[in-house]
Amino acid sequence: MMSVHQSGMGLAGIYTHDIAETKVKATKQLAEQHEFPLLVTMEPEPEGKES
């Protein structure tokens, strides 16, 4: 967790596109409801890292 505080970002998980999209939307809604300034993004896996 300290790396999140030092770098300002962290990886929360690796999911399929549909699941990631749902989790991002739910997290953003919850943060907004509680007036918490949280930036949530969904990014593709880097090239060559696919399983």
Image (cartoon, rainbow, N blue to C red):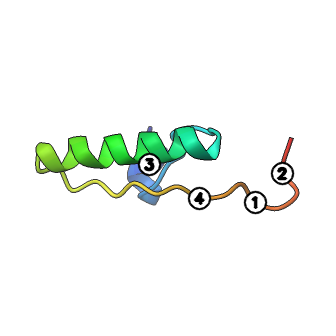
Instruction: Identify the residue shown where x is 30% and y is 49%.
Output: 28
- State the residue position of label 2: 49
- Relative side of 24 to 18, left or right: left
Secondary structure under tag 3 reads helix
Q: Nearer the viewer, mark 3 or mark 4?
A: 4
Task: State yes or no: discs 3 and 1 in contact (Cβ < 8 Å).
Answer: no
Q: With 45 as the anchor, is 50 left or right in this view?
A: right
Which residue is denoted by mark 1 in the rendering?
46
Question: How far across and down, in percent of the image, does residue 11 sit?
Answer: 54, 45
| Marks 2 and 1 close (CB-CB < 8 Å) | yes
Which quadrant of the figure contains the N terminus? Answer: top left
Mark 2 neighbour class, 10 Å CA radius: few under 14, some 14 to 19, many 20 or more: few
**Alpha carbon of mark 3 to alpha carbon of mark 4: how far?**
17 Å
Asked if residue 2 can be seen in this view, the reply is no
Q: Residue furthest front?
A: 18
Name the residue: 44% across, 48% down: 4
Task: Name the residue beneath numbered marker 4.
Answer: 43
Q: Where's residue 34, x and y in %?
A: 12, 43
Spatial distance from mark 4 to mark 1, Cα to Cα?
9 Å
- Residue 29 lies left or right of residue 49; in this view the side is left
Q: Are marks 3 and 4 in contact (CB under 8 Å)?
A: no
User: Disc 3 marks which amino acid?
Assistant: Val
Taking the spot 88% from the left edge, 57% from the top edge, the residue there is: 48
Which callout, 3 or 1, points to the residue nearer the camera?
1
Mark 2–mark 1 distance (CA, rounded to whole Å): 6 Å
* Residue 4's disc number: 3
User: Which amino acid, mark 2?
Assistant: Lys
Helix, strand, or loop for circle 4?
loop
Q: Is residue 19 above or below residue 8?
A: above
Q: Marks 2/3: CA distance?
A: 22 Å
